[in-house]
Amino acid sequence: MFARVISQGVVAALIMAMLFLHVWCELDWYLDISLRIMLTLFTSLLTISHTLTPFFKKNNIPLFSGKMTTMENNNPLKSSLNLVSSDDNFIAVVSQSCKTNDVNEWVVDSGATKHVCKNKNAFTSYTIIGDGEELVYLADSKTVKVHGKGRVLLKLTSGKTLSLNDVLHVPEIRTNLVSVYLLGKVGVKVSFGCDNFVMTKNDVLVGNGYCKKGLYILDISEILHDNASVYLIDSYDVWHARLGHASNSYIKMLNDCGLISFKNKTTHEKCDVCVQSKLTKKHCPSIYRESELLSL
């Protein structure tokens, strides 16, 4: 690189010197000689550059820039992620172990194909599964035994109750998992953000959650202890109000068609709004008032 710069500098200096002699000294006899010499030197300069170009490329020496190339980032982790050779057979991403120690925390996982729970006390209904009948395959290619399956009710902070059916009981699992795949099959949409997520169904808020140590935790108020795989339990009164205080027969028809679901309505429940709207007032007779003095 140093020799290349010196050779180019010498040629450039000679060209400038000859131009100075030709312009300032006004030597007419020098015109033809100077033009020939400048053409020869310029040809030599191109020859030197063309000859040294393969050498510069082989040694990663910049051809047209005088700046030294440096590492953009001295972080070895970032360099290892961004600078990957094409000859590598595989690329592995190493991350920290993410787990939660709270048995009541539920992680919303887009990679899970089943709902999984580690705590047997969270089930409202439970069926024992025999040895080897069903296994869960983990991300590290290991398998763990399923002890049983059942139903789990989660009371969300939005006020709704999320019912998870066919939840697998796996005591060896580190975290309770809610499958995004099964949520999507029943129309529940999960929208993930950088540090939170939102669950909606038919553009109505179902629940939300937050990010903790790289995991998306479902925000629940309690686990209720009292078919794939998920549905929302709403009371009859909620659907009655949502539908504009529709009649009992209309709501029952929607329930029979499977469009809505709710707890069984008891006979003693009454809607206060409907009662007030049906109140009637007796007609009051008009009162004749005298308009002139001494007309009584």
Image (cartoon, rainbow, N blue to C red):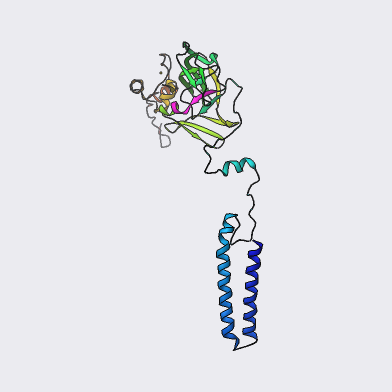
Q: Which residue is drawn at the image coordinates 50% and 32% (left, top)?
A: 198
The magenta stretch spans residue 254: no
**Nearer-the-camera pick, 35 or 280:** 35
Q: Which of 140 and 9 is in front in this view?
A: 9
Q: Quadrant of residue 261?
A: top left
| Front in this rendered view, residue 124 or 37 | 37
Residue 21 seen in the current view: yes
Highlighted range, magenta = 175-182
Looking at the image, residue 8 lies above or below residue 29:
above
Q: Residue at x 63, y 77 (%)?
A: 16
Towards the viewer: 226 or 104: 104
Residue at x-position 44% and y-position 26%:
182
Task: Indicate the position of residue 44 as horizontal and vertical percent values.
Answer: 57, 71
Q: Is residue 236 above or below residue 94?
A: above
Residue 186 can be seen in this image: no
Locate residue 224, reporting x and y percent. 52, 17
Q: In which quarter of the image is the C terminus?
A: top left
Percent from the top left, x then y, of residue 74? Answer: 66, 45
Quarter of the figure with residue 64: bottom right
How far across and how far down the image is residue 273, in percent?
43, 24
